[in-house]
Image: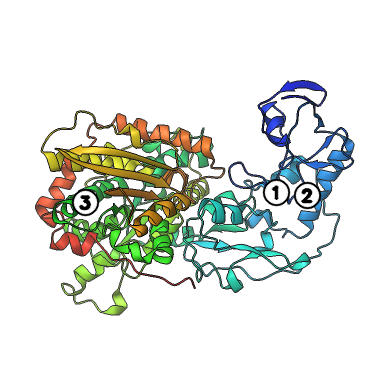
């Protein structure tokens, strides 16, 4: 199409909105409710433009561009309308920016500054709707900070098909809430945190574990160890002002040491352990007529989703705990014994890209280490402890670095501590959608066939398509596998499973777009372009690893030889496996 944008002839592809056409032409139009690939409901009115022939200003996020259209994006009329709409939003917004989690990373704050708004012209018209919703173990909702943009509703209903939140009320009583205001911790919320990731203000944030972690670090009686998920190394740099997707593994380790952690370990170690257990579980099901397809269980948001919406398919889930939980169980048993530390004095802190991990760490069944020690140490129920004590998101870790005055960019490159810091390339790629599947296939192929893989790169299951599939030949036994990210795509695969038409032997599901590297606890903004840059760094680290198969990790071999004894054995089953349960919707 040929258009005039601010009197400049412009040619853009057909089918774009006015906003998209302007952005293609290098003209930025501000917006609060619009978010590419998520939401465009024209609720904020900040994106208005003039179009020749139209009597009123048009909302560019929903207006289709047309051949010959003459568009003006900046005029006194446009400026006044945009400013007025932002001022009306500010009238009902709390004035506590300095103490808000989103301070200096708030779209409303930024737009107000860009528009030159330095005072409130209008009085508040809406009452404070309700107190904060703190019912969830992962998320906190503050309705008073909500600007009704609808992004959270869109991502929950369209991307995840969960529909835990929606618009409610009318007029001045309009709000976004859960069914009957029951709270996120009561309804069928999966804790994925995508709502927090797309929120333009501080209306939805992660539940803050930072103060508790500081207290543990400063307690001389505690041995505080930290584990970091693979996606953190490609996200934390962004939180510290570095380019999107920066691979900062060594700097991250150095920074964590300077925060005061006793040991800096790697969740990738437990990811390798997960592959040994999960790969053997898959082969056992194939050989012995077990429930197929087997579906991965590393993503806690996905686990809660299937518990709520597809409980009949629970037998298809791998019984393996996630790497986070396997790490906690091993740290408070094997590592505690090895170092002669009272497990009650070990505090395990995990750094995750995922808000649902906060919920997972406090699931009642995640206390394998306590059960291991209960009889040996004559512990009673009052001394019960979880395998993982606290979970920090990437954003929370960034705040801790800043609070400590750490100049992250100038940090040296340092290595993880041993033995729980040794990992392979297979573990690193857990951070990207398809990574768990690829890592599992690297091990399953060699264990099943006894042959060396000619190429460890399963590139046909990499990528950003919602569902990918492949066929792997195991010595004449073909198995079909599928990979899905987002719960919308997981729903499609589960519907096939429940109809009995699924052609797959093994399925990987990740809750968030792009997998863990697009998790709800990652730096804001996170979009498709940023996720792809993070994925490139994930695969680059895998390619440069000396060992790229989980079953070749020497520390994992030692763990089995001297502690676990064998995959799927009695101790492995007790510490590394669990059960999942049907849940109601309320």
Q: CA distance from mark 1 to mark 3?
A: 49 Å
Q: Which residue is mark 1?
A: 108
Is residue 345 left or right of 511 when viewed as pictured? left
Q: Which residue is mark 3?
A: 282
The residue lying furthest to the top in this view is 9
Is label 2 in contact with label 1 (beta carbons under 8 Å)?
yes
Tell me which label, 3 or 2, sits earlier in the chain. Answer: 2
**Label annotation for residue 86:** 2
- Disc 2 packing (10 Å; few <14; some 14–19; many ≥20): many
Q: Earlier in the sequence, mark 2 or mark 1?
A: 2
Q: Image check: 274 left or right of 410?
A: left
| In the rendered image, the vertical position of residue 438 relative to residue 13, given as above or below | below
The Cα–Cα distance between marks 2 and 1, rounded to whole angstroms, is 8 Å
The percent position of residue 10, horizontal first and vertical second, equals: 74, 22
Give the SS element for disc 2. Answer: helix
Q: CA distance from mark 3 to mark 2?
A: 55 Å
Q: Nearer the viewer, mark 3 or mark 2?
A: 3
């Amino acid at each position: 199409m040929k258009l005039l944008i601010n009197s400049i002839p412009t040619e853009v592809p057909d089918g774009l909105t006015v906003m998209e056409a302007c952005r293609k032409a290098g003209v930025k139009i501000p917006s609060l409710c619009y978010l590419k690939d998520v939401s465009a409901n024209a609720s904020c009115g900040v994106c208005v433009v003039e179009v020749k022939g139209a009597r009123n200003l048009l909302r560019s996020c929903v207006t289709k561009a047309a051949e010959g259209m003459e568009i003006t994006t900046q005029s006194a009329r446009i400026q006044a309308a945009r400013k007025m709409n932002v001022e009306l939003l500010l009238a009902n917004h709390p004035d506590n920016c300095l103490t808000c989690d989103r301070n200096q990373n708030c779209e409303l704050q930024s737009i107000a500054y860009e528009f030159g708004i330095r005072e409130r012209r209008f009085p508040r018209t809406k009452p404070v709707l309700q107190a904060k919703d703190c019912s969830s173990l992962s998320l906190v909702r503050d309705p008073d900070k909500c600007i009704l943009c609808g992004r959270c509703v869109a991502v929950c209903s369209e991307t995840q098909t969960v529909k835990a939140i929606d618009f409610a009320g009318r007029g001045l009583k309009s709000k976004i809430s859960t069914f009957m205001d029951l709270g996120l911790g009561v309804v069928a919320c999966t804790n994925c945190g995508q709502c927090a990731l797309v929120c333009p203000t501080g209306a939805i944030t992660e539940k803050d574990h930072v103060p508790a972690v500081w207290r543990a670090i400063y307690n001389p009686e505690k041995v505080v160890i930290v584990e970091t998920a693979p996606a953190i190394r490609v996200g934390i740099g962004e939180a510290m002002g570095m380019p999107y997707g920066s691979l900062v593994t060594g700097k991250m380790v150095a920074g964590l040491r300077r925060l005061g952690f006793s040991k800096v370990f790697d969740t990738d170690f437990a990811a390798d352990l997960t592959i040994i257990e999960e790969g053997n579980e898959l082969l056992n099901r194939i050989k012995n007529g077990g429930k197929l397809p087997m579906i991965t269980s590393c993503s806690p948001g996905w686990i809660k989703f299937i518990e709520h919406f597809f409980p009949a398919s629970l037998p298809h889930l791998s019984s393996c705990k996630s790497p986070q939980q396997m790490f906690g169980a091993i740290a408070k048993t094997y590592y505690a014994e090895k170092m002669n530390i009272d497990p009650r004095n070990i505090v395990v802190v995990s750094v995750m890209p995922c808000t649902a991990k906060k919920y997972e760490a406090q699931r009642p069944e995640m206390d394998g280490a306590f059960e291991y020690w209960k009889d040996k140490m004559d512990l009673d129920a009052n001394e019960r402890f979880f395998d993982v004590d606290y979970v920090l998101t990437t954003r929370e870790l960034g705040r801790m670095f800043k609070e400590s005055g750490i100049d992250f960019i100038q940090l040296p490159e340092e290595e993880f501590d041993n033995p729980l810091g040794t990992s392979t390339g297979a573990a690193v790629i857990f951070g990207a959608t398809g990574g768990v599947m690829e890592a599992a296939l690297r091990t399953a192929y060699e264990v099943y066939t006894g042959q060396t893989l000619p190429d460890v790169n399963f590139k046909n299951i990499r990528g950003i398509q919602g569902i990918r599939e492949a066929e792997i030949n195991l010595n004449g036994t073909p198995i079909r596998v599928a990979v899905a990210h987002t719960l919308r795509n997981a729903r499609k695969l589960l519907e096939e499973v429940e109809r009995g038409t699924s052609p797959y032997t093994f399925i990987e599901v990740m809750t968030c777009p792009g997998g863990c590297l697009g998790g709800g606890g990652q730096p804001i903004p996170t979009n498709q372009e940023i996720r792809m840059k993070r994925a490139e760094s994930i695969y680059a680290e895998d390619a440069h690893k000396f060992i790229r198969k989980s079953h070749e990790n020497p520390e994992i071999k030692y763990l089995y030889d001297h502690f676990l004894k064998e995959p799927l054995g009695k101790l492995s089953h007790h510490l590394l496996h669990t059960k999942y349960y049907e849940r109601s919707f309320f």
